[in-house]
Every structure is written in structure tokens, then in C-alpha cells.
Image: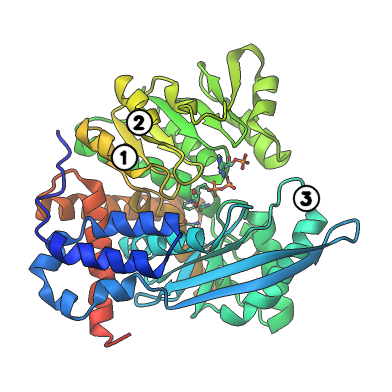
Amino acid sequence: MPTSPAPADTGSRVIQPLYAEVLRRNPGETEFLQAVREVLESLGPVLTQRPELVDARIVERICEPERQLIFRVPWSDDRGRVHVNRGFRVEFNSSLGPYKGGLRFHPSVNLGIVKFLGFEQVFKNALTGMPIGGGKGGSDFDPKGRSDAEVMRFCQSFMTELHRHLGEYTDVPAGDIGVGGREIGYLFGQYKRITNRYESGVLTGKGVGWGGAQARTEATGYGCVMFTAEMLRARGTDLDGRRVAVSGSGNVALYAIEKAQQLGAKVLTCSDSGGYVVDEKGIDLPLLKEVKETSRGRVADYARLRGRDATYVPHDGNGGPGPWQVPCEVALPCATQNELDEGAAAVLVRNGVQAVVEGANMPTTPEAVRLFQDADVAFGPGKAANAGGVATSALEMQQNASRDSWTFAHTEDRLAEIMRHIHDSCHDTAERYGAPFNYVIGANIAGFELVANAMLAQGLI
Ligand code: NDP
Ligand code: 2IT
């Protein structure tokens, strides 16, 4: 079943000047410009059919965040030395609900990266069908090698500034790279001290014993594999017995591996920024979780403990294909942006990959996406495929608002329902706009229309 290319871009006369203006206003913000470009390239047919959106300058407004916060985060390490980091929160769009999106702590974080993540989040959150707007935040703080006490002091300093901008009806952060249950706990504790409010719905990804939702930890990885299963079902096949390659070994990767294994797949790889592991017998997930979640270790430690069954390959530093050189039928990039480039995509295609589905945000470069589409490989973009995490965050907010807590099984059922809904709306939208099986077009148009319609209805916002 071939993936259709974008229909002849009748809207390109409209799109090109729009993109030129975004480029002019946001110089040097490479990742943000990449994310905007990819969405705009899909929108030609909608803008041609709906001139009222052009007249109302919806695209110009959607590309401009409602509010951008940048602040100083001073903290002291265990030896009493002072450090200064930079904090960000980009409140991108609140037409569908309070700003919602994660916080990333990683040394690479800058405004352009937070804006790309916030922009993607707007459409992703719309696709869930839940009442959440889009935002993203974080810091260039590097949690690697820091003690719990140092991470706590950093989180307390970060929240001391950020708290004034948050609220369950205003802005609700969660985790992302470098921010998991530990960090959310410290951030929540500081928010509560400063405001004197046990406002459960101000952060998601909380511990299950104190307001967190069952299955939130698992939700992004599980959701990504559920989405993959839906894509394969639409092509008349499934995951059972498939060889799967996964990158990353953090929250998303671990639970993508878990769900893929539950559905009968054999997962052969995982990775981190140091290197990757090939495990021909299939990843031993309890061991990997022990290394990553309990000991905060590296995939090299996993390979050492696994013994002869696993091979560890350090990254060569020359941009080689890494885990993608392992022959597989399904590839799930779950680490970070632009980790899967054209060279890696060519290797995957040559080895017969049938589906590539993004657990991470924008892990596949535009050239690699094109290569997959040209080769009729089913491609699931992150804003649809990894929306299970934020959707379950919205379920957490719902439980917090009603002072209720649901079972794991019930929450997982809701997640499966949501992923099916996202799949079907991307699939059907792509078909409606003359690009059957092109999930990039489907996700971009479906998400855009939901946000654009709300903005139109709400006046000049
Ligand atoms: P984690 O911090 O738990 O794990 C990140 C993983 O990616 C680690 O294995 C890390 O390796 C690797 N990684 C990070 N940066 C790089 C890099 N520059 N080069 C190579 N490897 C890297 O984060 P998550 O699992 O939560 O997030 C992974 C991706 O999924 C991100 O793109 C995130 O935006 C996205 N996402 C996350 C959601 C969530 O709910 N957590 C929801 C939707 C999307 P190392 O330890 O060596 O840095
Ligand atoms: O990219 C994402 O969707 C996330 N990091 C999760 C956001 C959230 O609010 O749960």
C-alpha cells in the first residue's frame, strides 16, 4: 500500500511567504524552523480550501508563541560552588486548554529547541481530542552525575521562578528528557511550599501514591507501540514475531520495548548517547530496567551484565547509522531530535524495514522521512505516535480534578482508545486530502484544523 506524497501543493504560493516570514523572525532557531517548515509543507490544501484561515492570519498567529519566559536559575552544588543555568517556558497556544507540555533538562536546551518542542506540542495535544493547549520548557542544566541533593536544589530554584506562571487552569508542566518522577516530586514540593496549595493538577507525572496516574510512566512508549500496531493493522498485518529496533533507553524507550514484547515482537536494540546494544536473543527488559531505573546506569552496563548475548558498540562520532544498521522490520526512534538521518534511513530501507514510528519528538530528519515515504515504508510522525504520554497526563488532570484514581487496566484501556482515535483521525484526514497513508499530512492537517477552528471562534487572539 504505497504512501502517497503530498498532493500538488496548490497552496505553495501562500505557504512560501509565510515560511519566509517565520525564517526572518526567528534567525538561527534551526530545530524550530525545521518543525514549522514540516507543518507548513502539509497545509497547502487546507489553506486553498479555506481562504478564511488565510484572511484571519491563523498560520502567522500559530507560529508565534503566546508568551516566552526565560529566567535565571542559580543553585549550589554539594561542595558549595555556585552555578547559574537558564530556565525556559514557552507558552505556545491556549486555544484548546491550559498550556501543557514537558520540561527538558539537558545541556543542549536553548530557546529554539524549546520552541520546536512547544510548536509540536500544540498539534499533538489537539490530536488527542483532549482539552489541552501546548507549551514546553526546560533548562540547560545537566542532571548527569549530579547527586539527588543537587538535583533537588536545582529543581527548587527552577520552581521558585516558574511557579508564578503555572496553575491547573494556566500551565501544567510534566517530564521530558532528564525530567522523570524524581524531578517532578521536587518541583511539586517546592510549588506547594511557595503557594500553600495542594494543587495536584499543576504538574503531571506525579508519583502514583500522591496524585499521579497509573500508567503515566508507561504511556508514551506503550502509546507509540499501540499506534504502530494500528498502522500495521491498516496494512493488514501486526507486530507478532517482528524484529524491532529501538533507540534510547530512557522513559519512552523502556516502555516501547515492554509493549512491543507484550505484542510478540523481538526487540534487538537500545542505546544512549554513548553507544548502542545489539541483543540477538531479544532485550532482557527486567535487566535493562534494573540498570536504568534503579541504578541510573548506561546501556554499556547492561551489555556487561548480559554477558555473551549482547554486544555493545560505542558511537563512532562520525554520524554512522548506530542501532539502525541492525536488520529489522520495525524501527522506533525513542531518544532525541534528528537522531535518524538519511544515511541511517537508507540502511533501514535496504534491510527491508516496513514501519518507522517516532517515540521521540522529531527524531527523523526531513530527508530521511522523504526516503521512507518514497520507499513505501509506513511512517508514523511523533506528534501523533508519541501523544500517549501527554494524553495520559490529561487523564491525570482529569483524576486530580475529580479527586479520583483509576486502575492501571482502566487507564491503559483509555490510552488504547485514544491512540486508536489519533490513528484514525490522521488516517482519515490524509485520505480526505488526497494523500492516503501519509500520516505526516494527516497529523499536521488534523491537528492544525482543530487549533485553527478554536482560534477563529475565539476572536483575534
Ligand atoms: P529520558 O531522559 O528518559 O531518556 C532519553 C534517552 O535519549 C536516553 O537514553 C538518552 O541517553 C538519549 N538521548 C538524549 N539526548 C541524546 C542525544 N543528544 N544523543 C543521543 N541520545 C540522547 O527521556 P524520554 O525517554 O522521556 O524522552 C525521549 C524522547 O521522547 C524525547 O524526544 C522526548 O521529547 C520524547 N517524548 C517524551 C515523552 C515523555 O512522556 N517522557 C512524551 C513524548 C515524547 P543519555 O542518557 O546518554 O543522554
Ligand atoms: O513531548 C511530550 O509530549 C511530553 N514530554 C509529555 C508532555 C506532558 O505534558 O505529559
Residue highlighted by disc 2: 345
The residue indicated by pointer 3 is: 146
Q: Residues within 10 Å of mark 1 (few under 14, many from 20)?
A: few
Disc sitting over residue 273 in the figure: none
- Quadrant in which the N terminus is drawn: top left
Query: What's under tag 2, amino acid-wise?
Result: Ala
Tell me how far mark 2 sits from mark 1, CA to CA: 9 Å
Residue 412 to residue 156: above or below: above
Residue 6 in the image, given as x and y percentages of width and height: 15, 48
Mark 2 surroundings: few (<14), some (14-19) or many (≥20) residues within 10 A: many
Judge left or right: residue 90 versus residue 17: right
The amino acid type, in three-letter code, at marker 3 is Arg
Distance Cα–Cα, label 2 vs label 3? 35 Å
- Helix, strand or loop under label 2: helix
Tag shown at residue 367: 1
- How far is disc 3 from disc 1 in space, using C-alphas? 37 Å
Q: Residue at x 12, y 50 (%)?
A: 431
Quadrant hosting residue 310: top right
Quarter of the C terminus within the rendering: bottom left
Instruction: Tell me if I can see residue 402 in this picture.
Output: no
Q: Can you see residue 415?
A: yes
x and y percentages locating residue 120 in the rendered image: 39, 59
Residue 450: x percent and y percent? 25, 69
- With respect to residue 266, does 443 lie above or below? below
